Amino acid sequence: MQSEKTYPLKVALVLGSGAARGLAHIGILKVLEQNKIPIHIVTGTSMGAMVGGAYASGLNAAQIEEIACETNWLRVAQILFPKRLQSSALLDGGRVEDFLLALVGERKIEDLQKPFACIAADIWSGEEIVLESGSLIKAIRASISFPFLFTPLELGGRLLADGGIVNPLPVNTAREMGADIVIAAGATPSVARNIRHVDTGKTLTRKKMTAASNSSSFIKRFLNTFDENGALKRVLTRPRQKLKKPGLRRQMIQIGSTMENQILSLRLKESPPDVLITPPVDEFQFFDFARTDEIIAAGELAAKKMLPKIKGLLQKA
């Protein structure tokens, strides 16, 4: 790789959240390496923390790609998912730490080849937590702990969960670490931000009813709606469900992705990168690890499109 001393300015690579879609970051790394783009600082959130942490620890893009493409993810999932579900999440955090130990080894963040930081969220306070020292495994484990999927990490009297809750693409952290040029890669699916006005249709009853005037009239009216077994006494005009309802897990993932995308939009306005790479990952799903090759290829395609801008910034350095 081209010597970092050639560039007086520090270049940061910021990798965002995205679950399986975040594997596109591997393709982006491949293109940057092939074109000898120097990376001095790495920050990430969630899957971006995992890929970025592996890269900062010394693995190159080809090594990370080989692990991602050749690993039997079904077998990994069978090990990670315990036979007895946890009370607070689907996945036991201890098993996730064993997975990370096998991936990046045991080391401290301050001993990595490149300065690295990742983002987690304090569940109780809602604070953005920057993890830039101490155990690399615990830092990544906290950053990838998607609510309800992974148990949160207990650290220093805090309960830490996925950083995408507060900062899906930590450009601000890279700036705070001294970056002069920030190359950021987002991997969350696009979400429509249109505002629509919708008529809610027919009323529940065929007669007009005024609002309850006090607590007595409210409770009498409400209880009178049901018989002693809790069944409705009268038929309301509720229409039959025509749309297929997503399962609980799908709802959780879809709502989480929508919230992350909206937060990402706001964070980019307050702290924009110099280059934003957005791989076309909308067609991929949260758990699409079986399509790793395609997702990595999407990252490569997006990075190649932004190469002229990246090289232009470096030439000015």
Image (cartoon, helix red, strand yellow):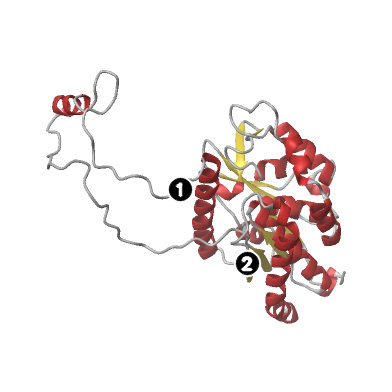
Q: Name the residue tied to disc 1.
A: 244
- Residue 206: x %, y % from top left: 15, 43
Question: In the displayed structure, does residue 39 sit left or right of residue 204?
Answer: right
Q: Which mark is residue 280?
A: 2
User: Marks 2 and 1, how far apart in space?
Assistant: 26 Å
Q: Residues within 10 Å of mark 2 (few under 14, many from 20)?
A: many
**Screen quadrant of the N terminus:** bottom right
Residue 146 position, x and y percent, is: 61, 43
Q: Is residue 105 visible?
A: yes
Between disc 2 and disc 1, whose residue precedes?
Answer: 1
Q: Quadrant of residue 180?
A: bottom right
Name the spot of residue 49 as percent of width and height, x first. Answer: 70, 51
Of residues 168 and 224, the one drawn nearer to the viewer in this rendering? 224
Is 211 above or below relative to 33?
Answer: above
**Please, what is the three-letter code of the amino acid marked with disc 2?**
Pro
Element on which disc 2 rests: loop
Q: Nearer the viewer, mark 2 or mark 1?
A: 1
Left or right: residue 206 versus residue 151 is left
Residue 142 position within the rendered picture, expressed as x and y whole percent measured from the top left: 67, 41
- Residue at 25% of width from left, 52% of height from top? 201
Disc 1 crowd rating (10 Å Cα; few below 14, some 14-19, many 20+) is few
